[in-house]
Image (cartoon, grey):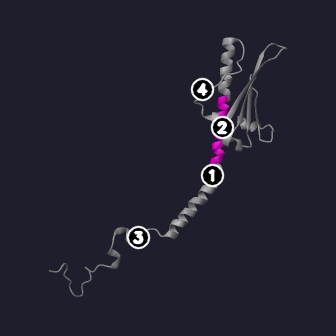
């Protein structure tokens, strides 16, 4: 018994050597060179995009710090309305995301000349945010004076925009 019948001169039923073997062994995949070229392209794209990503991330953390300063300022105003003076140890709930990137400090003092209380809230960059050389310190006070300082100590008003 024969498995296939060959007709002389007919090449329709002749199998090539590429058809023999499992599907993964055929010559239809990517070569190592093609994969390395793709890897090189992806690496170049990442190298180009990382600085922009980093700047965007730092800017979003700055935004969080500004939001925390305003939130503490609102809490101070609420405390002033209720108690008649500012509170030196107010804090935000632990759920705020920027706490790990900025250290918040508050100063409260009474100005003797007019008897008014005064507060200043300061956010200083820590951890990964300390790489942000443009806007490393933010301050906000009871007169709504907003200041920001770069790493070298110069004032940078662009940080509040």
Separation of disc 2 and disc 4 at Cα? 15 Å
Separation of disc 1 and disc 3 at Cα? 35 Å
User: Which residue range is magenta in the image?
Assistant: 53-68
Against 133, is 121 above or below? above
Q: Secondary structure at mark 1?
A: helix
Residue 116 magenta-highlighted: no
Name the residue tied to disc 3.
28
Against 69, is 2 above or below? below
Disc assigned to residue 50: 1
Against 73, is 102 above or below? below
Give the residue at x 59% y 57%: 45
Name the residue tied to disc 4.
93
Q: Position of residue 42 (x, y in %)?
A: 56, 59
Q: Seen from this angle, which residue lies furthest bottom?
A: 8
Name the residue tied to disc 2.
101
Q: Seen from this angle, which residue lies furthest right?
A: 113
Pointers 1 and 3 in contact (CB under 8 A)? no
Q: Secondary structure at mark 2?
A: loop
Q: Quadrant of residue 66?
A: top right
Q: Earlier in the sequence, mark 2 or mark 3?
A: 3
Q: Earlier in the sequence, mark 3 or mark 4?
A: 3
């Amino acid at each position: 018994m024969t498995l296939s019948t060959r007709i002389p001169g007919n090449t329709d039923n002749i199998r090539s050597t590429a058809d023999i073997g499992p599907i993964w062994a055929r010559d239809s995949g990517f070569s190592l060179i093609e994969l390395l070229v793709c890897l090189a392209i992806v690496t170049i794209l990442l190298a180009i995009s990382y600085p922009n990503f980093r700047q965007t991330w730092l800017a979003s953390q700055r935004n969080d710090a500004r939001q925390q300063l305003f939130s503490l300022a609102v809490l101070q105003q609420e405390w002033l309305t209720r108690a008649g003076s500012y509170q030196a140890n107010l804090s935000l709930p632990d759920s705020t995301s920027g706490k790990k990137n900025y250290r918040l400090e508050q100063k409260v003092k009474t100005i003797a000349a007019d008897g008014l209380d005064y507060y200043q809230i300061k956010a200083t960059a820590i951890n990964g945010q300390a790489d942000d050389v443009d806007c490393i310190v933010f301050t906000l006070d009871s007169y709504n004076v907003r200041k920001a300082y770069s790493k070298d100590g110069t004032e940078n008003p662009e940080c509040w925009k």
